[in-house]
Image (cartoon, rainbow, N blue to C red):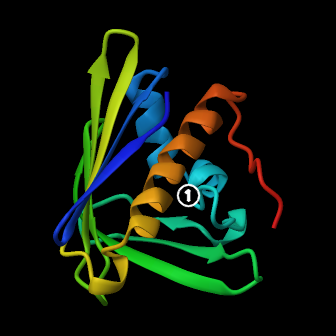
Amino acid sequence: MSANSELRGDELIAKRHLPAEPERVWAAFTTPASIAAFWGGSHATVPPGSVTVDLRPGGEFALDTRGPNGATRRLRFIYVSVAAPHELVFDEPVTGLRTTVNVRPAVDGTDLTVHQRRLPPELRTTQAADGLASILDALAAHLQGSDAPTDRRTP
């Protein structure tokens, strides 16, 4: 099973079932080493040392992404709401993009929904939707790997 994503105007919604308990999925979204292991999806890598997490409302979450051409971009988000282990809400302060991550228990794992609102025009594309889906697929691969967070990609 792979992630599916849907663009609706200035919103992007991606969903994926994960064969892991909600606490493990939550830890993947809130632990720097795990974030580095999956965040780039199929389109970028994330240097493990670049990820910072201050997991509290008003705290910052930041990371670097490195594209296939070697270009690096710093991403920065501010947590709005942290309701462990079920919901994270964070904003990208420059564009106003709001991301809500919902982690819901399911019979054989977790149902994950990532809902982005207020997408800037440059992210209202099929490429952005495919990129978000690939991040959730990379998360699934990471969770199926060892319990120890590792970076499965090379920069």
Residue at 46 percent of width and 68 percent of height:
127
- Quarter of the rendering containing residue 143: top right
Residue 49 placement: quadrant? bottom right
Determine whether the residue tagged by mark 1 lies in a helix, strand or loop.
loop
Q: Nearer the viewer, residue 105 or 129?
A: 129
Total marks placed: 1
Residue 79: x percent and y percent?
Answer: 28, 66
Frontmost residue, 152 versus 83: 152
Question: Where residue 120 sits in the image (x, y, percent)?
Answer: 27, 83
The residue type indicated by label 1 comes to Trp
Residue indicated by mark 1: 39
Label 1 crowding class (10 Å Cα cut-off): few <14, some 14-19, many 20+? many
Residue at coordinates 74% horizontally, 74% vertically from top-left? 68
Residue 124, visible in the rendered structure: yes
Residue pictured at 48% horizontal, 78% vertical = 75
Measured along the vertical axis of the image, is residue 120 above or below residue 39? below
Q: Residue furthest top?
A: 107
